[in-house]
Image (cartoon, grey):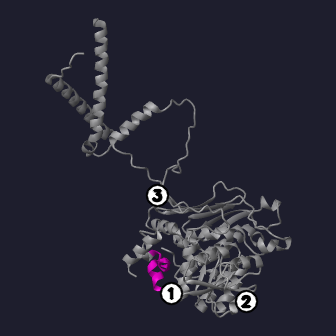
């Protein structure tokens, strides 16, 4: 595909103006690449048919290149629910039996975090290509093992970091890399919700099985379930990895209602080698500010969630006549001040800003399952394309790997009350996405 | 009701008056350019505002003339 064709295809994806060489992993999403694999089908097995697994199934049924031939879950209601979409699929309650099915080419793993690495490793060993939900693993060592094993076996491995495929993030990152907001001097991420993060449990013995996110035996809580998505923004924007991390986490509210042991309030700071800080904060007992991801530059700010660009540079003042008329207006219209503040914050936060692209789908971050038009569908399509071509896209696995490692490292820093750096043994070759 | 007659002399006088207003508006534009250090090409690009300002000045003068005429008419009676 030549550059002109790709740009045309990008336009159809809502990515008009995006430069091919900067985002090679998106090529698989273009109509041209889809045409190249037209008529091909990937036989998929899904391990974990809960809410996120079902979210993927609802996308897969719309994709002619996907054929779900096997479903697996050890919770029968979820399995039966998923089977309604693919009545012909074979049903399993043990993922190892599914992996023995030679008909399955690729698997989608949407299970609790602690199972991600063992299942991914087993699937790759069984000769399957793998799409695993984020985070990549429950421990730093497991993530490294998965990364190294994939490399040795030469399998396709995708992790569910869908922002890499979300048109508004792609467009924003291109603008950042082109210097539109100047030098990047800060990255702010936050994710606020006001709900207990619980799923309904039909009987008490299923509490840990269904609400695994709330227990440290199965999950690392907010860092691996939410932060992992946002931490990747920093590396993407900065083109480098954090050097050290510190953080604080507490259980301040929801533990009054249940026996959870993962933090419901976390704050973490990631410092890059050039001194720039990236922050992540999450509170799940107040939702006023919702979800936010902002890249701060010397010339302006890009809000990734709302796809808005705010400039720090003063707006052009207009002609001399305009300024003269405005001065008269100010003189006539302003009230006489005899008491008031003597200090005002220097802020451009109230500036209206400009959208970076048209028809932006803004995701609130309130859903624990996923949102439409957040890149998940494109990510899944890219996985299917990679299975058909047998080609692992460059760089994206490393992004997912480090997003997981830094989420886990921050969680560790919170528990150890320490400032931590990523041990050399966990470092894998990293090429920035710019 | 009597017919109103606008003579050529009256038209010439009003046109001259507006011309004076236009010059004043231009002077305001030059002063603005100097005061706010904006480019001199605004002498041409801002001509629309200059014409508008000249009409505003002309209208203000017209109001003053009407007021003067009303007062004059009242006291002459």
- Kindly report the distance in space between the C-alpha atoms of the residues bearing marks 2 and 1: 30 Å
Nearer to the camera, A313 or A386: A386
Nearer to the camera, A287 or A93: A93
x, y percentage for residue B12? 16, 26
Q: Chain of mark 2?
A: A
Q: Is there a contact, CB below 8 Å, between mark 3 and mark 2?
A: no
- Say which element carries label 1: loop
Look at the image and give the residue range highlighted in magenta. Answer: A22-38
Label 3 or label 1, whichever lies nearer to me, is: 1
How many C-alpha atoms fall within 10 Å of the one at disc 3: few (<14), some, or many (≥20)?
some
Write down the residue under mark 1. A39
- Tag 3 and tag 2 share a subunit: yes
- Say which element carries label 2: helix
Write down the residue under mark 2. A96
Q: Chain of mark 1?
A: A
x, y percentage for residue A416? 74, 69
Q: Main secondary structure of the magenta part?
A: helix
Q: Which of the two discs, 2 and 1, labels the residue nearer the N terminus?
A: 1
The residue at 28%/10% (across/down) is B73
Nearer to the camera, A179 or B76: B76
Query: Quadrant of the rendered structure where residue A138 is?
Result: bottom right
């Amino acid at each position: 595909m030549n550059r002109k064709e790709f740009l045309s295809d990008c336009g159809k994806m809502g990515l008009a103006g995006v430069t091919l060489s900067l985002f090679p992993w998106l090529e698989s999403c273009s109509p041209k690449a889809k045409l190249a694999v037209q008529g091909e089908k990937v036989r998929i097995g899904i391990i974990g048919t809960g809410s996120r697994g079902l979210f993927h199934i609802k996308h897969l049924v719309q994709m002619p290149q996907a054929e779900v031939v096997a479903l697996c879950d050890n919770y029968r209601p979820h399995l039966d629910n998923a089977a309604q979409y693919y009545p012909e699929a074979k049903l399993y309650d043990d993922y190892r039996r599914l992996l023995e099915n030679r008909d399955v080419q690729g698997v989608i793993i949407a299970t609790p975090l602690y199972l991600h690495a063992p299942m991914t490793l087993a699937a790759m060993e069984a000769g399957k290509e793998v799409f695993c939900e984020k985070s990549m693993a429950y421990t730093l060592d497991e993530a490294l093992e998965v990364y190294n094993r994939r490399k040795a076996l030469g399998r396709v491995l995708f992790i569910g970091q869908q922002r890499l495929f979300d048109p508004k993030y792609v467009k924003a990152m291109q603008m950042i890399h082109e210097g539109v907001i100047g030098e990047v001097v800060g990255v702010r991420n936050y994710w606020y919700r006001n709900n207990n993060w619980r799923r309904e449990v039909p009987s008490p013995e299923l509490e840990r099985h269904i609400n695994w996110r709330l227990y440290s035996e199965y999950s690392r809580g907010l860092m691996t379930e939410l932060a992992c998505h946002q931490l990747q923004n920093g590396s993407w924007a900065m083109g480098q990895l954090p050097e050290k991390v510190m953080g604080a986490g507490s259980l301040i509210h929801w533990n009054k209602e249940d026996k959870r042991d993962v933090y419901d309030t976390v704050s973490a700071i990631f410092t890059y080698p050039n001194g720039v800080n990236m922050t992540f904060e999450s509170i799940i007992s107040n939702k006023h500010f919702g979800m936010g991801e902002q890249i701060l530059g010397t010339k302006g700010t890009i809000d990734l969630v709302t796809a808005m660009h705010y400039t720090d540079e003063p707006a052009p003042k207009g002609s001399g006549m305009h300024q003269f008329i405005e001065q008269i207006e100010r003189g006539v219209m302003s009230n006489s001040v005899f008491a008031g503040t003597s200090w005002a914050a220097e802020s451009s936060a109230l500036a209206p800003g400009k959208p970076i692209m048209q028809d932006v789908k803004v995701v609130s971050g309130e859903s624990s399952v996923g949102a439409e038009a957040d890149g998940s569908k494109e990510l899944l399509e890219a996985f299917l394309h990679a299975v058909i071509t047998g080609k692992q896209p460059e760089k994206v696995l490393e992004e997912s790997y480090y997003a997981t490692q830094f989420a886990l490292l921050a969680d560790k820093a919170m528990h150890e009350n320490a400032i931590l750096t990523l041990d050399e043994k966990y470092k894998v070759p990293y090429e920035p996405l710019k | 009701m009597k017919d109103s007659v606008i003579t050529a002399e009256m038209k010439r006088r009003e046109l001259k008056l507006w011309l004076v207003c236009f010059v004043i508006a231009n002077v305001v534009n030059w002063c603005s350019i100097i005061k706010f250090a904006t480019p001199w090409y605004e002498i041409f690009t801002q001509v629309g505002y200059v014409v508008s300002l000249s009409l505003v000045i002309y209208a203000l003068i017209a109001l003053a003339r009407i007021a003067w005429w009303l007062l004059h008419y009242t006291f002459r009676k």
